[in-house]
Image (spheres, rainbow, N blue to C red):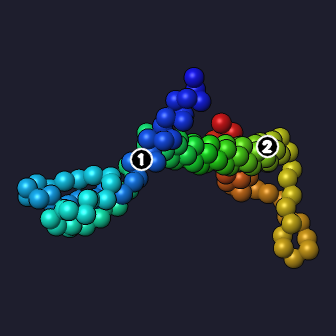
């Protein structure tokens, strides 16, 4: 049954794309036929070639292809976004751990030393310690969510 329906649709689409003749008969009536006009026709105006209209199956296939293309594009964008968020989360995790480590060092070490830039070391005073504790707390608030 399916093959019969397909065959009928195929044959009808072939007939739709056939040539159509427009001519005026001896009574002055304009005729449209798929056969050439008889030799006794009063006037032959033109032979028209009519293109077949797109079938619903063709439109559906085109629409389906467009939808699939859009779907694939959206899926790729979502995967890229997910990958970008995972990379950002990993970066934030490492920055959070570093900030927590710095905070622990500045809070728990009684005598903290830093390089002085000249090859020596200096002890960190209370003001510098508090500045570093505040910086660490800000980093923890930003990266440790």
In this view, the residue in front, 123 or 11, is 11
Q: Is residue 40 above or below residue 76?
A: below
Report the number of discs: 2
User: Residue 45, located in which quarter of the rendered image?
Assistant: bottom left
**Circle number at residue 15:** 1
Disc 2 or disc 1, which is closer to the eye?
1
CA neighbours of label 2 inside 10 A, class few (<14), some (14 to 19), many (20+): some
Q: In the picture provided, is 72 more to the left or to the right than 106?
A: left
At x 46% / y 48%, what residue is drawn? 14
Query: Which of the marked residues, 2 or 1, is nearer the chain's N terminus?
Result: 1
Quadrant hosting residue 59: top left
Relative to 118, residue 131 above or below: above
Q: Is residue 29 visible?
A: yes
Kindly give the residue lying farthest to the right in the view shown.
119
For disc 2, the marked residue is 97
Residue lying at 65% horizontally and 36% vertically, measured from the top left:
145
């Amino acid at each position: 049954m399916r093959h019969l329906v397909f065959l009928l649709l195929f044959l009808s689409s072939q007939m739709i794309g056939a040539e159509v003749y427009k001519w005026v008969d001896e009574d002055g009536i304009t005729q449209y036929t798929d056969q050439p006009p008889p030799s006794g026709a009063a006037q032959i105006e033109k032979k028209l070639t009519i293109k077949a209209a797109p079938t619903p199956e063709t439109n559906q296939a085109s629409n389906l292809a467009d939808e699939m293309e859009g779907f694939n594009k959206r899926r790729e964008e979502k995967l890229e976004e997910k990958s970008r968020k995972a990379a950002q989360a990993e970066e934030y995790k490492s920055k959070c751990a570093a900030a927590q480590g710095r905070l622990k060092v500045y809070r728990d070490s009684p005598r903290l030393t830093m390089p002085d830039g000249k090859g020596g070391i200096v002890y960190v005073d209370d003001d510098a310690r508090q500045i570093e504790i505040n910086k660490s707390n800000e980093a923890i608030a930003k990266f440790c969510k």
